[in-house]
Image (cartoon, coloured by chain):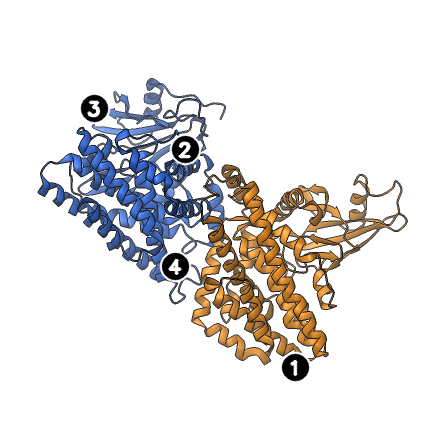
Chain colours: A orange, B blue
Amino acid sequence: MTNYHALTQAEAVEYAHGIEDVFPDGAQLKSREIGDGNLNLVFHISDPASGRALILKQALPYAKVIGESVPLTLDRVRIECEALRIQGELCPDLTPKVYAYEPDLALMVMEDLSDHIVMRRGLMERGRYPLFAGHIGSFLARTLFFTSDLAMDQQEKKLRVKSFINPELCNITEDLILYAPYTKSRMNIFEPHIRDAVERIWADKELHLEVTLLREKFLTKAQALLHGDLHTDNIFIKPDSTKVIDPEFAYYGPMGFDIGTVIANLLLNYSGQEGWSTDTLERTDYRRYLLDTVHDLWTQFELQFRELWNGHAADRMAKTRGYQDLYVARLLQDTIGFAGVIMLCRVHGFIHVADIDHIEDAAARERAQRIALEIGVALIKRNRSARSIEEVLDIALKAVN
Amino acid sequence: MTNYHALTQAEAVEYAHGIEDVFPDGAQLKSREIGDGNLNLVFHISDPASGRALILKQALPYAKVIGESVPLTLDRVRIECEALRIQGELCPDLTPKVYAYEPDLALMVMEDLSDHIVMRRGLMERGRYPLFAGHIGSFLARTLFFTSDLAMDQQEKKLRVKSFINPELCNITEDLILYAPYTKSRMNIFEPHIRDAVERIWADKELHLEVTLLREKFLTKAQALLHGDLHTDNIFIKPDSTKVIDPEFAYYGPMGFDIGTVIANLLLNYSGQEGWSTDTLERTDYRRYLLDTVHDLWTQFELQFRELWNGHAADRMAKTRGYQDLYVARLLQDTIGFAGVIMLCRVHGFIHVADIDHIEDAAARERAQRIALEIGVALIKRNRSARSIEEVLDIALKAVN
């Protein structure tokens, strides 16, 4: 990695000129840095004349969010590129195109999605995306099924596990999502007004056992190639299109982690509605939409996953009577458990969500935080006995009534 | 691997001369090929004058057992060496010493164990090894605990998973142990007199579901660095010493596979006693010894595993209340299930055991085969509900009464 250096704006523009078939010859390119700045530089490079644009993303060799003292390997760009390639083959309409990848500079160039908005923002504005459940259900079903032992040559799958060993990024999840929120750690950030609820979580031994079992799955269960970070900031959306970005946390893990991450983020917005509308009817109505989306997402996922299994399973024992039902039942349980841990870490852990943190009224924000914590704890405690997605909706409804 | 060629006897001797600190200068070395010939050349090279000897083992680039048409990577020697190094650090008294490793020639040189006998032979002669249960319990507890997420730096463990990705050797287990015996496959070899029992296994849907779940664990559960082939031909023994050899199947898998393999091989010998003694009292007495050994082995394993956990767990959530008990309970269940599948494949699958196949009397051999199949099927069906090792003993006793 001797040739690596962080690009200047000017260098980014120069590099973008070299990408074929995007900009007209002699285009006057403009550039702005649009990264959220945690782990990467992200340049949006556009030609105002033709209206064309692309994204140039370069990994930084440290985690900016924690300070330069936390180094991160640049290998994550290889992992992200390779994951985008696989996701793009399986779900071409749901994955941004990659135009170039430069290992030495840890950079890649990809499709501009400026005509989409970040889904978290969309939900905070009470946007409705009737195609979303089907799109993301399909993304989950196809990426998880086709990268698993159910569908792949099982010896090829082992080589893929090897190429997606991703210690540093997994470590972030293992620490910040699956450990710190359950202990009095400096990595937890929360407002004093919810300290009582957080302390109950720190003291809840039944909860800790469930989290430990989920964490064990994250550490050991090489079930499918996960996106690994499928929250609503990593989903770009417009009414007729959904794009999943940023799979730099990709690794072989338990399928339920990805499905649970999407559901958790819908339920975090559901909790946050406490602060986004004072009109009770409007709030109830949008929450109903969010729960319908959770329900449809799981239903679409399950339907497509079972169809793929029936039509495309390569595993010679996949047709064993009872196996598919048991597999899907355990998937739902993992999904519910991981949804719970992801909700909690986003309320009192290290990285929060705007759906709740940006609520201006302190009392409403506190109510939202308490609702999210209540749902998260209930999902985690229910996970091993859960039998249907309706239980998730019941838990969510109970928390606001 | 351009320099690779299979060594002649003369070349093996020349190579052995170069190993330091084994033979006196100018020793007149003798060599004989002692491999079972499946996957490797094995030369025993000795100096009759000093009584010193060593083993030179070279991997062949194909599986001789199936014919030269099945190529195998020579990378398995790297895996075997690396596994022996790790096992040797954790259990120096139970692992042969490695003197040299030559990657280009896919060969390694190690300690001669001629003063030990192959444990399968020892059991067929009704030998008793009172230290065995403690030795192998310790080997299993230490190698499985210290290579797992419970004890290792969890990011280092991921790199170790990567270096032990072992597709070809795992494929042998996945095909010959975890698939073929449950289907009418040409990879099954059995005598016509047990066809009815084998056909019942092929038709037993309840059994197939359990095997499919165990197979899924073998495919996905990266719990600890397994030996991967811990049968009694890979254990060298004498009254005061036990050595575990040949970890070329090593990979990160479910701990219960290794423990179950040892137990299965004790129970295969237990089944075979039908043909090794016509004295009922003697037979019953030796079977009691074998069941005591199964019981002690599990008990020793559990005791040491729990002690290591209490004293050496690095995982920050390992102390979570209830986790250790649940972990050990699931380990026992996996152990019982894998013991069952290993028994079955050794009766009607591709590779049999001498404990049963070498029984000369056809009626006794048939009885032994039927006992082993009955125990194997019962263990598999019991696995998910099992609560104690006594259930294994009950199943074994019932099969001979």
The chain holding disc 3 is B
Q: Residues within 10 Å of mark 4 (few under 14, many from 20)?
A: many
Instruction: Measure the C-alpha gap from mark 4 to mark 1.
Output: 43 Å
Is residue B310 positioned above or below A224 on the image? below
| Residues at discs 3 and 4 both on one chain | yes
Q: Residues within 10 Å of mark 1 (few under 14, many from 20)?
A: few
- Image quarter where the C terminus of chain A lies is bottom right
Percent x, y of residue A234: 67, 57
The residue sitting at 49% across, 46% down in the picture is B159
Q: Residues within 10 Å of mark 3 (few under 14, many from 20)?
A: few
Please name the residue that numbered disc 2 is placed on.
B77
Q: Mark 2, mark 1: which one is toward the viewer?
A: 1
Percent x, y of residue A345: 57, 66
Q: Nearer the viewer, residue B186 or B285?
A: B186
Q: Is residue B382 left or right of residue B121?
A: right
Instruction: Measure the C-alpha gap from mark 3 to mark 1.
Output: 89 Å
Instruction: Measure the C-alpha gap from mark 4 to mark 2.
Output: 31 Å
Q: Quadrant of residue B237?
A: top left
Please name the residue that numbered disc 4 is placed on.
B313
Instruction: Measure the C-alpha gap from mark 2 to mark 3.
Output: 29 Å
* Label 4 or label 2, whichever comes before in sequence order: 2
Residue B342 appearing in the image: yes
Q: Nearer the viewer, residue B229 or B318?
A: B229
Please name the residue that numbered disc 1 is placed on.
A363
